[in-house]
């Protein structure tokens, strides 16, 4: 799904239900948590969140080149309007 979102970021053809998320990604800054549209996620309840990460808490203390960091969602963004998450501790990475 991350690859498909990245593809949309660079595409001129963005589905209407992905427009706000892609606009935020193209801004290359700030923090947001947007629901991924059904055109991409289908019936799944999937979210794209951009936030600061304490790199020292990650394996090898850096963000991987794919720029995807797994985390546990602590509260539903639909309920809070913001991201409440915890980075998955490095000891659980394979």
Image (tube, rainbow, N blue to C red):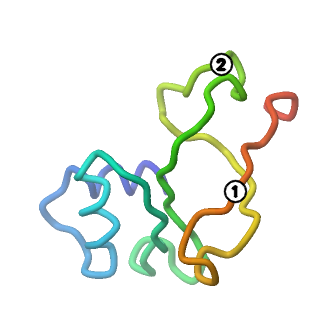
Q: Secondary structure at mark 1?
A: strand
Residue lying farthest to the right in this orientation: 91
Query: Percent x, y for residue 90?
Result: 80, 29
N-terminal label among 1 and 2: 2
Query: Does residue 67 appear left or right of residue 85 in this picture?
Result: left
Query: Percent x, y for residue 83?
Result: 59, 63
What residue did someone put label 2 on? 61
**Label 1, residues with CA under 10 Å away: few <14, some 14-19, many ≥20:** some
**Between residues 53 and 3, which one lies in front from this camera angle?**
53
**Label 2, residues with CA under 10 Å away: few <14, some 14-19, many ≥20:** few
Who's the residue at 61% across and 40% down the image? Answer: 69
Instruction: Reply above or below: 25 against 37.
Output: above
Who's the residue at 76% across and 64% down the image? Answer: 74
What residue did someone put label 1 on? 85
Query: Does residue 83 appear left or right of residue 48 in this picture?
Result: right
Query: Percent x, y for residue 49?
Result: 51, 58
Whether pointer 1 and pointer 2 mark residues with C-beta atoms closer than 8 Å, the reply is no
Instruction: Reply above or below: 40 against 6.
Output: below
Instruction: Reply above or below: 58 against 34.
Output: above
Who's the residue at 42% across and 77% down the image? Answer: 37
């Amino acid at each position: 799904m991350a690859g498909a979102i990245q593809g949309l970021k660079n595409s001129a053809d963005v589905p209407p239900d992905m427009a706000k998320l892609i606009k935020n990604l193209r801004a290359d800054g700030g923090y947001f948590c947007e629901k991924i549209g059904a055109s991409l996620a289908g019936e799944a309840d999937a979210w794209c969140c951009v936030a600061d990460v304490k790199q020292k808490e990650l394996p090898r203390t850096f963000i991987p080149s794919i720029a995807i960091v797994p985390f546990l969602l602590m509260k539903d963004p639909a309920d809070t309007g913001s991201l409440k998450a915890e980075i998955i501790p490095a000891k659980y990475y394979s």
